[in-house]
Image (cartoon, rainbow, N blue to C red):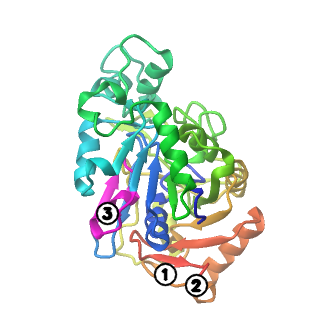
Amino acid sequence: MQRSKVNFIVDGQWGSCGKGLIAGYLAEKHKVNVCSTNNMPNAGHTMVLEDGTKFISKILPVTAFLNTVGQRSNILIGPGAGFCLDRLFMEIERCGLDEEDVLIHPRAMVVTQEHAAAERGDSSGVSTKHIASTMQGCGTARAEKIMRGAHVELARDFDVLKGLVTNNGDEWFTLVHNILKGDKTMWLHEGSQGFSLGMNHGSHYPQCTSRECTTAREIADMGISHQKVGDVYLVIRPFPIRVGNVIEDGKEVGYSGDCYDDQEEISWADLKAQSGYPADFDLKELTTVTKRLRRCFTYSDFQVRMAAEINGATKIALNFANYLDYSIFQTSGNNIKDLPDKVRDFIAMIEDQTGLPVTLVGTGPGNNHVWDLEE
């Protein structure tokens, strides 16, 4: 990570690559003191501390949770964010933050139950169930902001947020750029969702989210120059996932989308068999937000190369390496020679295809389940 720059974590596939794990590890290692995000309610980043304490963030950067173990940081929520008020205050309390620790851009969106209801088709809105959307109200809130109607309410319009929101965009600009002038600033920005879910450059439309999921979009939302970008960590997994399809009364009513031409969908049972997991281990994943069974796919070289190029990645973090070889589940280390052949060969393949170093290897849910190959 680079000092006095904004370092980014972005997801190189369809999301759920474990950005929370990588964010937590990097924040602890580099003593990050500025954390930011443009999360919306369809995000769900997870941090698990060494003692097993777990925190799932949908609004704050997940690294804010390190405040509970004494690592304090300034928390910035950008104008591209959207959040539910109750959830925001719950997360602030859960992380033990004070009002002065959190700063929100005045044009961040407040997402309401009415926005979510519209996406479920409960009101006059158009349901997004057919694309297996999370139906959290994000797209509806964004569309409302874009239309600039008379009844739009942003963060600046809520009295309950007065102590957290900057007075205007000018104040935000001054604050952000004063932070970047500091020679002790260590800033980490968490991108949400996944590159392949992007509306314009993702794998499939309309099975996508309501915005782009790239470093460039995060830069634009935060109001910083590309010249202030430090390292960009592209987080990937050997077997990427898509959110599960929507099944009602035994019938598929929502399809989450296809995959790239150089990959195929596989079952969790097949993955379990080839990774060496114990017979009694129930290997499957449910999405953080919807709790649907995730769909699993083989690795796509094209997907990762495209994500690395468009996001301007400088380093790669490989999560879920234990899906390649169960023997390293929940382990850590710093010597690539100590990793199983299957994992080392996979790392070599990624580095050859992208021209980028794999610097972090995640093997489990906890901040301590990381192999740091830079040490």
User: From the viewer's perspective, is the residue at label 3 or at label 2 nearer?
Assistant: 3
Q: Which residue is mark 1?
A: 328
Q: Which residue is mark 2?
A: 339
Contact, CB < 8 Å: mark 1 with mark 3? no
Q: Is residue 192 left or right of residue 127?
A: right
Image quadrant where residue 164 sits: top left
Instruction: Specify the quadrant that holds the N terminus.
Output: bottom right
Instruction: Specify the quadrant that holds the C terminus.
Output: bottom right
> In terms of secondary structure, where does tag 1 sit?
helix
Residue under the image location 51 percent in, 58 percent down = 187
Residue under the image location 36 percent in, 34 percent down = 136
Q: Which residue is mark 3?
A: 67
The range drawn in magenta is: 53-73
Q: Is residue 98 left or right of residue 296?
A: left
- Give the image location of residue 74, x and y in percent: 40, 54
Q: Residues within 10 Å of mark 1 (few under 14, many from 20)?
A: many
